[in-house]
Image (cartoon, coloured by chain):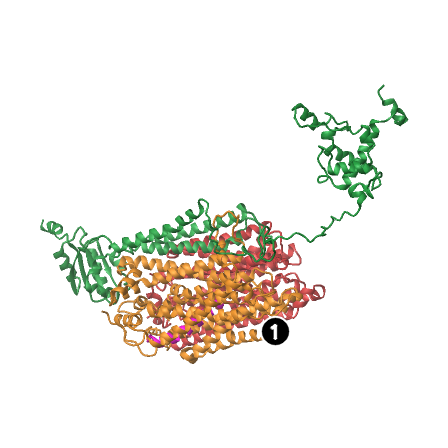
Chain colours: A orange, B green, C red
Amino acid sequence: MSTLVIASEDNTGNDPCRRAPLVIGQQTDVTITESVCRVPEQIGTPRAWYAALLVSMGLTAVFFGTIVYLVTTGIGVLGNNRPVMWAFPIVNFVFWIGIGHAGTLISAILFLFRQQWRTAINRAAEAMTIFAVICALIFPGIHLGRIWLAYWMAPYPNQMALWPNFRSPLMWDVFAVNTYFLVSAMFWYLGMIPDLATLRDRAKTRWRQIAYGLLALGWSGSARQWQVYQQAYLLLAALATPLVVSVHSVVSTDFAVAQLPGWHTTIFPPYFVAGAIFSGFAMVVTLMVPARAYFGLKHLVTVRHLDNVNKIMLATSCIVAYSYAMELFIAWYSGNSHERFAHLNRAFGPYAWAYWLMIACNVLVPQLFWLKRCRTTPWMMFLIAAAVNVGMWLERFVIIVVSLSRDYLPANWAMYYPTIVDVLMLLGSFGLFFTLFLLFCRYLPMVAIWEVKHVLPREEVHHGSP
Amino acid sequence: MAAHEQHRSSAGLAGLLAEFASAEAVRAAASALRSAGWTRWDVHSPFPVHGIESAMGLRRTGLPWMVLAAGLAGVFLAAGMQLWTNGIDYPMIISGKPLLSLPTSVPIMFELAVLLAAMAAFLGALGLGGLTLFGHPAFSSPRFRRATTDGFFVFLSADDPRFDPAAAQTLLQSAGAVAVEPLQLDASSRQPPSAVYWALATTVVLAMLPPVLVTWYRTGPKPNPRIHLIHDMDFQEKYLPQGTSPLFADGRATRPPAPGTIAQGALEADEHLYTGKIAGQWATRFPVAPTAAMMDRGRARYAVFCAPCHGLVGEGGVSGITSARAVKRREPNWVLPLSLHIPTVREQPVGQLFHTITHGVRTMPAHGAQIPVEDRWAIVLYVRALQRSQNATLDDVPEAVRPRLRP
Amino acid sequence: MDALNPEKRMIPSAKAGAAAIGLFLVGLAGLGCAAALQFRQESSGGYFLHSYLVNFCFFTSLSLGALLFVTLQHIARAGWSVTVRRVAELLADNLAVMFPLLAPLVFTVLAGNGILYPWAVSESGAADHVLHQKQAYLNPAFFVARGVGYFVVWCLTARYLLWLSVRQDRTGDPKLTLSMERLSAPALILLVVTLTLASCDWLMSLWPHWWSTIFGVYFLAGAAVGALALLILLVVLLEWAGPLAGEVTIEHYHDLGKLLLASVAFWGYIAFSQYLLIWYANIPEETAWYHPRHSGPWAWVSMGLLVGHLVLPLFALLSRWPKRNRLSLAFWAAWLLVMHWIDIYWLVMPAYDPQQPRFGLSFVFCLLGMGAVYMAGFLWRCRNRSLVPLQDPRRHEALAFHND
C-alpha cells in the first residue's frame, strides 16, 4: 500500500509553480478503488437511480414503439416531404454521432497530449460515445423505408448484380460510423479489462466473480501484459484520433458534396468536427455533474476536471462561431445570389427563430465560460451545457431543414413541420441513451481506476499535468 | 546435486509469490532479480509501474508492425473493392464521376485501414498479452486478490531453470519482499467443466438447425406455400386472372365484357371492306381505289402467303413448294391446290375472292387472322392481275414489248 | 542557476548584430536584383510581384505559425515546451520585419494596375458584375488598411508576449506566466481571425471570382507545418551551437516530431476536404481554381505536393525512431519547409501563368533575399535575449518529462 501526496480541498487554483492535484483529499490506491467499486458492488438498488431508470426505460419504450409503428406503417408517418426530404431522422443521426465524439477526444486525443486529468472522466465519456453511436445508428436504418433490406448496403456477392454505390457519401457513412462504433467499443473494452479484473477480485458472490472474471479475460496485471497493453492502448489512441476527425467529416460530406446553397461549403468537415466535440462535451457535463454528485465521486471527478472540460467547450464554441462567421462572410463575398439568399433566409426567413436561438445557445451563452465562476459552479455549467445541447441540435436543423425548404426552385419551396412521430422518436432516443448510461453506471466501473492510480504522483519523477 | 533433485521433487509446486510494499520496492526488486539471472518470472501490479520494463529487461513487441501491416492491407482492400465493384464489374457512371475514381474511394480506404489496424491492435493485445488464459497459478492465492487494488507482487515460476525454492525465498526476502508464499499447481483436472461441453454441443446443434431447415424446405415439392415473412407488395388487395370471386354467380373474378362491347379499332362497320359483300351480294368492285402501291403490296403479300401452295403464277397443282413437297412425301390427305386461272375462279367476283382468303374454302385454311384487311384486298387485286396475265392474247401485249416475246 | 549566467543561453550579441546587419544588406540587395532582373525582361513586373508575394506569404506564415505555437502552449499550460518556446517567441516577433515588406503589395494595389490583383483596377467593378459585388471589400484603400491592421495586431501581440517572457527572465515572477496565459486566449482568437482574412486578401483574391470557406484554415495548417519545421531546425542548430545545449532532450524532438506529424496530417485533411468537395459538386465557378492545377505541367506540381507534402512525411514520421533522431527529424523538417514553400507557390503562381510553373534566377534572388532579411530580423532579436526562458516556473518540467 503506497501513500500519496496529500492534496488540498480545492484544486481549481492556477499556480504556475506547481501542478494542481488531480484528486481531492488523502487518497490511496485502496480508497480510490473503494470509491469507484462501491457503486457496482452495491447490494440492493439505489432508489434515485431506479426511478431515473424507470423514466428512461419508459422513454425507450416510446422510442421502440414509434419505430415499430414507422416500420409497419411506412415513411409517410414522418414529416418528410418535398422539398425537405431529409429532416428529423438525419438531424438526430448527426446530433447523436456528434455527441459521441467527445468520448473519443477525451480518451484518445487528450491521452496523446499527456493530459492526465482525463483519467477521471474517460471511462464514462467513452461509454457515452458507444451509447450515442448506438442511438445514432438506429436513425439511418429506420428512415430508409425497407429496413429489412439494409444488408444491401454491404458489398456481398449476389445474383442481382447489385453493388453499393461507393461514390456516395452515404456509403462512406456506413463504413465510417460502423468503424467508429467498433473501434470505440474495442478501445472502451480494452481500457476496462484491468478494472473488470479489480471487480472480479473483489467480488463477494460466485456469480459476480464468474461474470466479471469472464469479461476480464484472465487479466493478472503482469508487467508483460501491461507492456503490450500500453502499446495497444497508445496505438488505438493514435488510430482513434484521425478516426474521430474523419467520421464527422464524412458525415458532413453527406451535405457538403451536394450543390445546395447552405450545404455546399468547403469548411464543413472541420466545422462539423468542432461542433461535434462541442456538443459531446456538453453532454459529458450534463452526465457527469449529476453522476459525480449522486455516486460520490466528487473527489475523483473534481471541479478542476469540469473546469477543463468547460474550457474545451469554450474553445470549440469559438471555432463554431468562426465557422458561422466564415460562412456569412464568404456568402457575401462570393457575390452569388443563391448563397447570399440562403444565409439571409436563415436569419430572416420563416425559421429565423431557430437560427437566432442557435446563435444564442452556441455562440453567446458559452461565452459565460470566460468567467471562472461559471466554469467552476456545477449548476451553472449544467445549464450552459443544456443550452449547448439544444443549440447544437438546432444547428443541424437549421443547416438541413432550412436549406432544403428554400432550394434553387422557388416553385418547390414549402415549409416543413415535424409530426408527432418525429418528436416522440427524438425524445425516445434520449430514453435509450440514458437507459444504457444508467445501466453502465450501475454495473460497470465508471471511472478508470487503474488510470487514476497510474497518473497520481508518487515519490519518483512524474509527468506534468495542467 | 540436491537442488536438481529438489527441482524434480517439487513438481507439485507452481512457483513462489512474493508481495512487496510499493511500486518502487517492486521495481528495485525486479532489477535485483534480473541481475540474479532469472527468466521465468513476472511482476504483477494494479497499474503499470514506471520503468518496470527496463528493470525487467523486457523488449518491445512487434505489435506496431502488425498494426501497420493490417492498416496497409485495409487501404489496398478498400481501394480494390471500390474500384473493382463500381469501376470494372458493374461500371456505372453516376453524376459524371469517372469509373475508376480515386478521390471518392479515399474515405472508405481510410476507414477500413483504421478498422483493420484497430482490430489488429486489439486482437494483438489479447494474443500477445496472453489474455484468455484464466488459469494463472497466482489466482489460487487469496493475497493475490490485492494485485488489482494496491498490491505489488512478483511471481517466480517453477519452470525457471534456476528454480530452487529455498534460494529463491532468500533472494526475494533480501530484495524487500514483505511476504513469500509457495503456490501449488492446481490439482484439479485440467479439463474444462462438463457444462462447457454441454453448452458447446447445444450451440453447435442449434447452429446446425437453420441450414438444415433451409435445405429441407428447398428440396422437393411441398404441399404448402413457402414461408414468406416480408411481404413487401407481394400480396395485394386485387383479383388476379383466373381467380375466384364470391360476388358473381359463376364464381369468376374475370368477367366477360358486356354484350355489344367492341374493342377500340374493332368496329367493322364497312361491310364491303370487311366482308367483301354489298347488301348480302358479292362485291364486284374494290372498296378502296386500286393503286400501283397496292398492286406492289399485293404482289409481295401474295408471295408470302399464297405462293407456297398456289405457286407464284397461281397455277396451283404442284407449282407451289408446299404442294410439291406434300406430293413428294406422298401425304395421304393432301388435296392439290386449285389453279386460280380456271374459269370458275376467274368468274368469281372480287368479294368472293376476298371471302375465300378470309375464311378459307374446302381444305384451304382461313387466312383472315394472318393478313390484315387492306392486305387481303391488295392480294385480290394482284390475283386479278395474275388471272389476266394468264389469259391474255397477243393484242394485250404492248407494242414495245412484243419483240421480246418468244416465238 | 542559469539566471546567474544568462550568457550561456544567448547568442553573443555583437556577432548576432553584425550578422544581422550583413544579412539584411545582402537580403535587400537580393531583392533589388530580383526586381531589376524582372523589370528588365517584363516592364509590368507581374512575374516579380507574384514571386514576391509567394516569398512574402511564406515567411509571414512561418512567423504566424510560431505565434500560433506560442499562444497554444500558453493556453494549454504546457511544461514540456518551455525550453523551446523562446525561439518560437522570437520567430513570432519577427513579424515586425515582415511588416515593411508589405510595401510592394501596397504600392501595386494602390497603383490600380491589376497586375497582381485583378480587382485592383479602379474600373473593374463596372466591367465585371461579380467584382462589383465585392467592391466594398476588395478595394485598394480597404485592402491596404486591413493589411496594416493585421500587422499591427500581430506585431503588438507577439511583442507583448515576448516582452512578458523576457521580463520573467529577470524577475522570475510567476504572475507573468498567468498574464501570458490570460492574454493568449483572446490573442489566439484574434490571430485566427486576422490570419483568415489575410489569407483571403493576399491569396484568395488572386482569383477574385473564386471562394472557399476553408481557405483560412488551409493557410493556417500550412503555416503550422512550416513553423514547426523551422522551429525544429533552429532547435537542432542552437543545440549544436551551444545556447540550447542541455536544455532540450531527445524527448523534445520526439514531441516536436509528433506535432509535426499531426500538423502534416491536419494539412492533408484540410487540403483533401477542399479538393474533394469542389471536385465532387463540379460547379464551374469553384472548379475554375483547380482547373489549371489539374492540367499540364501544373498537374505534376500538384502530384508532387500530394506525395511530398503528405504521403511521404506521414509515413516517414509515423514510427518512433525517426522522431527520436536529430538528423532524421532535421531532414524531414527541412523537407517540409521546402514543401510548405511549394504549397504557397502552388497557391499563387497559377494566377500568373496557368499553363506553366515558372521558376528562374529572379525567383531565387527573391527567395534568398527575403530569407536573408528574415534571418537578419531573427538574429537582431536574439541580441541580449536569452534563448531559453530562464525563470519560467515550469522550466524544470521540460527537462524531466519523458515519453513512454
What is the magenta range? Answer: A273-297
Q: In this view, does C153 lie to the left or right of C121?
A: left
Res B403 visible:
yes
Q: Is mark 1 on a helix, strand or loop?
A: loop
Give the main secondary structure of the magenta stretch: helix
Q: Quadrant of the N terminus of chain C?
A: bottom left
Q: Is residue C87 above or below residue A17?
A: above
Residue A43 falls left or right of residue C44: left
Drawn side of residue A313 relative to residue B98, left or right: left
Residue B185 pos. (x, y %): 18, 55
Q: Position of residue A81 (x, y in %)?
A: 59, 65
Image quarter of the C terminus of chain C: bottom left
Which chain does the numbered disc 1 sit on?
A
- Nearest the camera: A355 or C25? A355
Residue closest to the far front: B249
Residue C197 in view = no
Compare residues C95 and B403 and report the one nearer the observer: B403
Looking at the picture, how far across and down is residue C55, in whole percent?
A: 55, 60
Name of the residue lying farthest toward the top: B407
The residue shown at (67%, 68%) is C133
Residue at mark 1: A350
Type of amino acid at the residue the image marks with label 1: Pro
Extreme residue in the left direction: B2
Q: Does the magenta stretch include residue A435?
A: no
Q: Is residue A278 magenta?
A: yes
Crowd tier of the residue under label 1, counting other residues whose Cα lies within 10 Å: few below 14, some 14–19, many 20 or above: few
Percent position (x, y) of residue A44? 30, 73
Quadrant housing residue B385: top right
Seen from the viewer's position, the closer of residues A432 and B230 is B230
Vertical arrangement, residue A245 with respect to residue A58, above or below:
above
* Label tally: 1
